[in-house]
Amino acid sequence: MAAGRSAQLARIREKRAALRKQLWGDLDPGHFWHRKTHDGYVTTPRTMPLVLQIIDTLTNGKPASSTYFTLWSRTKDDDSMVIIDDPKELSLEAGFSGSRSTTTWTTRMRLLKDLKFIDTKEGKHEFHYVLIWNPHLVLKYLFSEKKIPDKEFYNFLIARSIEIGCKDFMDKQE
């Protein structure tokens, strides 16, 4: 089955490359970000835009999606863990500036922890060590607990997951 999947992905890549060439002509591959040729990449689920929208819905006027994505972008080798030596750096990356940037970031981190998107352990500060849980499983749990007020994004997330072959929302894993 793995060989069949690889062949299928190769055909998809070939078709997309042919379409890109047809639409834009010959392009220098160096002008594109490619995870296999550049350092500093992270694997991101294709559902991440919806996950981020739902996070902002759940945090009631205190958007935490940029904080979450900043954490996600800091993971190494898909290990789902972040070590934060300087909270000020992450607060700036999340878009918070000024004298209250770290305080605002800390509030968002607490919201993400309360919602169970992350778990943390103290070190040099309250959020020195961060573990990021599978966001699909967190959202599935929050939905089962009736904590997701906007069903539109959640239903679209399920539909998108099925479309891309993600089985996190299925009751039985195949």
Image: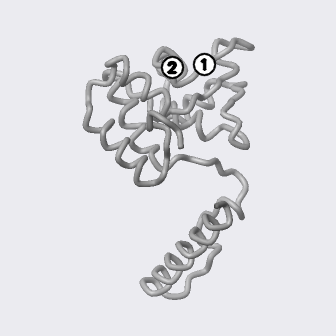
Is residue 86 or residue 119 the one in the foreground?
Answer: 119
Residue 96 screen position, x and y as percent: 48, 30
Q: Residue shown at 56%/82% (left/top)?
A: 27
In which image quadrant can residue 139 be found?
A: top left
Residues under numbered marks 2 and 1 in contact, where contact means CB atoms less than 8 Å apart: yes
Front residue (pair 15, 30): 15
Residue 91 location, x and y as percent? 55, 28
Check the picture and name the quadrant holding the N terminus. Answer: bottom right
Q: Which residue is drawn at 46% across and 43% down?
A: 48
Sort mark 1 into few (<14), some (14-19) or many (20+) by Cα contacts within 10 Å. some
Asked if residue 25 is positioned above or below residue 63 in the image, the reply reads: below
Packing grade of label 2 (10 A; few <14, some 14-19, many >=20) is some
Disc assigned to residue 157: none
- Residue at figure coordinates x 68%, y 14% from the top left: 121
Callout 2 amino acid? Lys
Residue 87, percent across and down? 63, 24
What element does badge 1 sit on? strand
Task: Name the residue tied to disc 1.
Answer: 119
Name the side, left or right, on which 7 lies relative to 63.
Answer: right
Residue underneath mark 2: 116
Q: Is residue 47 above or below residue 103?
A: below
- Rounded to the nearest angstrom, the CA distance separating label 2 from label 1 is 7 Å
Helix, strand or loop at mark 2? loop
* Point 46% across, 54% down: residue: 164
Residue 46 horizontal side relative to residue 80, left or right: left
